[in-house]
Amino acid sequence: MQQTKAQNMYDVVIVGAGLAGMVAAKMLNEKNINYKVIEASHRSGGKVITAERKDHSRFFELGAQFVNEDMTEIVSFIESAGMELQETDVNEKSMDITAPTRKALGKCVTDVQHEMIKATGEQDERLSDLYERVITDEELKKVISSIHAELLNIEPSRLSAKVLTDMHERYPSEKSDLTHQASGPLSHLISFLEKNLDGKIVYNEPLRQVNETKEGYTLITDNDQYRANAVIMALPPAVASHFSYSSNLEQYYRQALNSYTDGAIIKTTWVFQNAFWHYYAIDGETKHVGGIVFTDPQGITVADSSKIGDAEVRLTMFIGAGLARNLAKEDEIQRKEIATELLEKVFGEQARTYVDMEQSVWVDHPYCGGGYGASVHYRGVDTAADVLREPYNLFVFASSELAESFPSFMEGAVRSGQYAAKQILKRI
Ligand SMILES: Cc1cc2nc3c(=O)[nH]c(=O)nc-3n(C[C@H](O)[C@H](O)[C@H](O)COP(=O)(O)OP(=O)(O)OC[C@H]3O[C@@H](n4cnc5c(N)ncnc54)[C@H](O)[C@@H]3O)c2cc1C
């Protein structure tokens, strides 16, 4: 390891160049703060990553993709990066169905979620135990647990029931999270943020240890050491739980960090030339299927991810929790085939008429965690996000999970980065 060089001393070091870290950096940049961002991987963006076909004919979002109009901060960044919002092709006439049972899903899903929130007590219990207490209809129980296994990317038996109330309170929108998408690849947003950071990001620099001393903070990476007066840890809490901390930081944060468990998600998108799911025969009528919830196997949903105005149409499948972990062990060809077979169960041979397909695996990712975000597990501290979000001396965590609004969405990452930067700017 090299000796700490004078040029490795900063007012602020930000760890992680995902959305939270980059947005925090942008704010420090605007105030002419002497800062550095250290990033473990070779690229910025974290869970925002686009795959573009070599001939630029089409692109796929491997991670984050959808927004709604209440997610004002990320929408504003998308627009600043030169893109517009485009509507996803689902509306109030589209219908969600179950698979393989092929039944229409109604308002009962929202109603039962409200009942469950009301029934959540002060005592911690497993989310799966809450289902047993509140939901009498066995089929509905399967629907709800499958939705949660996908949405939270973690088996409901491993989660605290309080996650549900938390999810509800911290999603300040009546709109679905899928209503809009950027008109172009989100990699444009990441390039826009990078440009503003003026070469301040050091790549391939994974942090391993942080020490707080009287002189400030020392951050030890695989290659170097950095000294800083303040630190913003802009990475998922379950990832941050693997680092070593000096005893005061360890004592203050360990319980909160260990309260999080990582999700697991596999995202598959198919491109079609014909939107056959717009003409789906169900209960004697022809309906536009906008979404599918698999009750068997659990943890799978499918969404119409087509954008209004695009020539091609798309379906995207999200496979979460245990099934994602198991599938991640298969090779790529087998994994793609399993996903297509699942789609075939609903749409028959038409599912195989796709012209392109992309799949991304977010399971046990060493730097981004496994899913959309981490969640507090059963017996975890339910105030963990509050503990991590507020600075302790000049040290603070930021990441989508910690945002007061829209955790585990891009909006949460932006808001959390902004909040952390504001807190540090107030104090240095
Ligand atoms: C498949 C998938 C689909 C999603 N879909 C949506 C969607 O449609 N809409 C939406 O709003 N959100 C979606 N999300 C969630 C969204 O992507 C995240 O909430 C958001 O991008 C998280 O940003 P972040 O900055 O908090 O964390 P991250 O993106 O995880 O960034 C953390 C950064 O820290 C770096 N890092 C980690 N460890 C170290 C270390 N030791 N040293 C230095 N750097 C380190 C990482 O490499 C990474 O760059 C999706 C996520 C996934 C995986």
Image: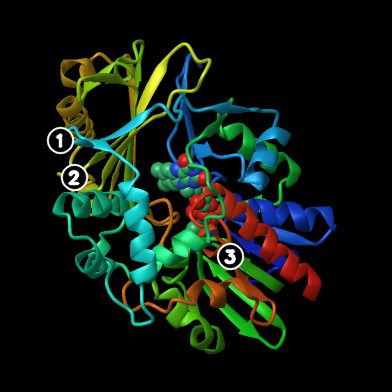
Whether residues under marks 3 and 2 lie with C-beta atoms below 8 angstroms apart, the answer is no
Name the side, left or right, on which 225 lies relative to 319. Answer: right
The residue where tag 2 is placed is: 295
- The spot of residue 388 in percent (x, y) is 55, 74
Is 307 drawn above or below residue 214 in the view shown?
A: above
Considering only order in the chain, which callout, 2 or 1, is on the residue closer to the N terminus?
Answer: 1
The one of 223 and 411 positioned closer to us in this rendering? 411
Closer mark to the observer between disc 3 and disc 1: 1
Task: Identify the mark at residue 224; answer none if there is no mark.
Answer: 3
Q: Amino acid at mark 3?
A: Asp
Q: What residue do we see at 63% from left, 36% from top? A: 189
Q: What residue do we see at 40% from left, 75% from top? A: 259
- The spot of residue 138 in percent (x, y) is 14, 54
Q: What residue do we see at 71% from left, 46% from top? A: 199
Considering only order in the chain, which callout, 2 or 3, is on the residue closer to the N terminus?
Answer: 3
The residue where tag 1 is placed is: 100
Considering only order in the chain, which callout, 1 or 3, is on the residue closer to the N terminus?
Answer: 1
Cα separation between marks 3 and 2: 49 Å
Cα separation between marks 1 and 2: 7 Å
Is 15 drawn above or below residue 344 in the view shown?
A: below
Q: Secondary structure at mark 3?
A: loop
Q: Amino acid at mark 1?
A: Pro
Q: Secondary structure at mark 2?
A: loop
The one of 402 and 193 positioned closer to us in this rendering? 402
Mark 1 Cβ inside 8 Å of ligand 1: no
Q: Amino acid at mark 2?
A: Thr
